[in-house]
Amino acid sequence: MSKISEQFYVNEYAVVDKNVEIGEGTKIWHFSHIQSGARIGKNCVFGQNVNVGNNVIIGNNCKVQNNVSIYEGVTLEDYVFCGPSMVFTNILDPRCKYPQVGSDFYIKTLVKEGASLGANCTIVCGNVIGFSAIVGASATVTRDVPDFALVIGTPAKIVGWVSEAGRKLNFDDEGYAYCEKSNKKYKFENKRVIEC
């Protein structure tokens, strides 16, 4: 039977370990596993076959699509979107013969507020995905992604800039762009985008 409370929903085929925090309005669907020590915010949605590792921190209003594993060492801020089958790593030199067990070995990864990670992309550990950045489908992130950047390819490279609402920004001769959807103005300077 599904676990339904006034605060959150867990499907009957999902597993939630002890010592887990789940925020109000969050939904956890079929065959997902939330491991001990995980802290999940409000109004998140976890699709089918999602694994949230030990001690992972997830903010509010995040959406994690099917077949995503969020390993220990990863932090998602609010409003992060993880597309289907995208991949996080948490060790740079995995070897079965020389196992690395325990949180001391895990390299931290931070995904900042509003970022979107496309289907089948890979985020190599130790990097920061910037505020409202978009990582394209199947991209491989091997370095930090700046705020508002649109990156694609392997290794991922910046091919444009997007607004907080995800719209492509077209800058005028003075380096300004406006997004009607977010009703915000942006400026491109020093190879970075900032909100005005």
Image (cartoon, rainbow, N blue to C red):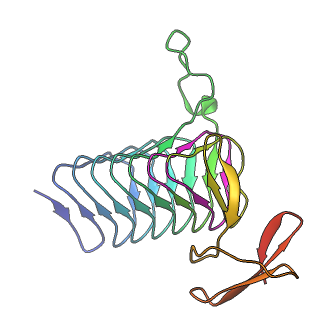
Number of dots carrying numbers: 0
Q: Residue 32, percent across and down?
A: 29, 48
Q: Looking at this view, is 111 or 41 the one in front?
A: 111
Provide the residue span drawn in magenta.
Answer: 118-137
Which of the two residues, 81 or 75, is positioned nearer the viewer here? Answer: 81
Counting from the top left corner in percent of width and height, residue 4 is at: 19, 66
- Examine the rendered structure and indicate whether residue 134 appears above or below residue 128: below
- Residue furthest toward the front? 173
- Give yes or no for residue 122 being in the magenta stretch: yes
Q: Name which quarter of the figure residue 78 lies in.
A: bottom right
What residue is at 48 percent from the left and 41 percent from the top?
A: 71
Q: Is residue 37 magenta?
A: no
Question: Could you say which quadrant of the image residue 7 lies in?
Answer: bottom left
In which quadrant of the rendered image does the N terminus lie?
A: bottom left
Q: Tell me what residue is drawn at x 45 percent, y 70 percent.
A: 61
Foreground pick, 31 / 184: 184
Q: Position of residue 77 (x, y in %)?
A: 57, 62
Whether 1 is drawn above or below 196: the answer is above
Residue 122, percent across and down?
53, 42
The residue that appears at 79% across and 84% down in the rendered structure is 196
Q: Residue furthest left?
A: 1
Does 194 sit left or right of 13 as displayed?
Answer: right
Q: Residue at x 64, y 55 (%)?
A: 151
> What is the chief secondary structure element of the magenta stretch?
loop
Q: Is residue 31 left or right of residue 109?
A: left
